[in-house]
Amino acid sequence: MSLFGKKQTDTASVTYISFAGDTHQVAVPIGDSVMEGAIKNGIDGIVAECGGACQCATCHVYVDEAFLGRLNPIQEDEDEMLNTTASERKPNSRLGCQIPVTKELDGLIVRTPKTQQ
Amino acid sequence: MTSDGVVIVGAGQAGFQVAASLRMEGYAELIVLIGDEPSLPYQRPPLSKAFMAGKQDIEGTALRPLAFYESHRIELVTGAKATSIDRAGRSVSLASGRSLPYETLVLAVGARNRTLPVKGAELDGVCYLRTDAEAVDIRQRVEQARDIVVIGGGFIGLELAAAARSLGKAVRVLEAQSRLMPRVVPPILSDFYRDLHTGQGVDISLGVALSEIAGHQGKVSEVVLSDGSTCPADLVLVGIGVVPNIELAQDAGLSVSNGIVVDERLRTDDESIYAIGDCAEHPNPFAGARVRIESVQNAVDQAKCVATAVMGRSENYRAVPWFWTDQFDIKLQMAGLSGHYGQVITRGEPESRKFSLFYFRDGRLAAVDSVNRPGDHLAGRKLIGAGTGITPEQAADPSVDLKALK
């Protein structure tokens, strides 16, 4: 039930793979972020201390190479924040809170780092 | 031997984080998290920002789903009010009559809104924002409102004004002081925000005093100023600061002043009882004084500090304060505490709407406020935390790479 805001009828499948190799495949409503998909489904490995305001870099994920080209581009604040992640920044590093789930991302695979803080 | 574990009073950002961090640290004993609101613990920042502007639904503010508390063996007691602490017997009593024994007690009891001391403040349509329920109520009222008056030109008032204006409403902000956010930013930022809001069509009135709120049939109709002028209003949103919830601690004989008094390790004068978050008056090395800080950063970092102490690795609280506010398309990020600054250096051009202010106190960098310059903000957090030497000349020179300073 949603009183206001985004319509959340359609979903896309997102798979989260932990550092230890645990895999969770969940249906994330279109418009929710990759971070929200993890939090709402109780998936450990994403902390999201600031709640998605691009302020804390604790929702760091490594995006599967096959999906990199379909992502929204990195903005300046996310780029700066990615320089402060607790685990190594790689070319496929993103903040989960800055990736809105779209239909085009159906099947997305992200890996969570060893530590977020 | 099992201990009575940790009882946390207050299920806001700070209380939640204590429970979460304890389990992350491997704490194995009982954890009880007591909240006086009916909802699952949630984030407050979006209530006046993304939620109010229609960009996030209220369910999206929950910190974790219910299943998290079950899987992490955190007993979550919602809608419950703690009424007294028996320090000698180490237990907390709830209004329901239940008594909860504790080994360690954490008071994360927060603050409540300061209320308007004028006639008419009780009228329907005079609203305050702190809880999710209040946010949902205000959001519905904003939808139906025509003339919205915001009382208080601080963070909450201005965020609400920006959200309501972005929904196309007529908004007027009344601020008693001669500039916006006077307690927390210097005049250059106050002026920047006045221009921002004015440019978006918000009517800003500074240096005005309220006389009363007038109504018709129990519902607000206008705000009357001390000079006799009136502003039509079918919705009045009040954001004039908060009062820390000290009563539970005070009644238990703990020291209180502008908050529950704690030491550098966030302990009250009872070593089994900590106080954290909005309610805790703590010695802060970045303020050089005892302060109370109302922010997510402070709530989260103080919670982690206490969780670490419970695990037997007690350390002084010394996290760099940081804060942010979103108004229209402008993000202001603050690192350090800028109050009582000496020298202020501007980096970048305010006209470009991308600039930072560097505050120096006794020749040392004390704080950085950044407008749409996230790189400066993060560099500032690091420089302030490490106590790295940076000169005012370096701060002023955009060609100096702040991240490279050692």
Image (cartoon, coloured by chain):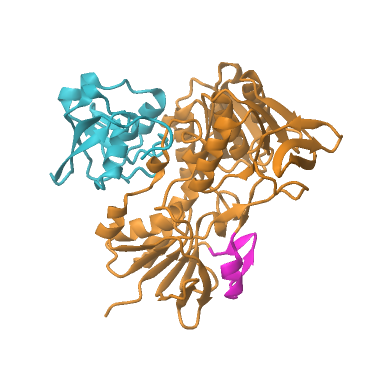
Direction from residue A23 to residue A72 in the image, left or right? right
Q: Quadrant of residue A111?
A: top left
Furthest residue toward right: B227
Residue B273's place in the image compared with B339, above or below, is: below
Looking at the image, which residue is at 74% across and 40% down? B216
| Residue A100: image location, x then y, percent | 31, 28
Direction from residue B365 to residue B187 in the image, left or right? right
Q: Which quadrant is home to the C terminus of chain B?
A: top left
* Residue situated in front as seen by the camera: B128 or A47: B128
Furthest residue toward top: B352
Furthest residue toward front: B217
Q: Which chain is orange?
A: B
Q: Which residues are magenta?
A: B245-263
* Residue situated in front as seen by the camera: B261 or B290: B261
* Residue situated in front as seen by the camera: B266 or B156: B156
* Residue situated in front as seen by the camera: B235 or B279: B235
Say if residue B159 shows up in the picture: no
For chain A, give the colour. cyan
Q: Quadrant of residue B222?
A: top right
Asked if the stretch drawn in magenta spans residue A92, the answer is no
| Residue B197: image location, x then y, percent | 63, 24
Looking at the image, which residue is at 71% across and 45% down? B218
Furthest residue toward bottom: B88
| Residue B112: image location, x then y, percent | 59, 54
Asked if the stretch drawn in magenta spans residue B261, the answer is yes
Residue B115's place in the image compared with B145, above or below, is: below
Say if residue B300 shows up in the picture: yes
Direction from residue B138 to residue B94 in the image, left or right? left
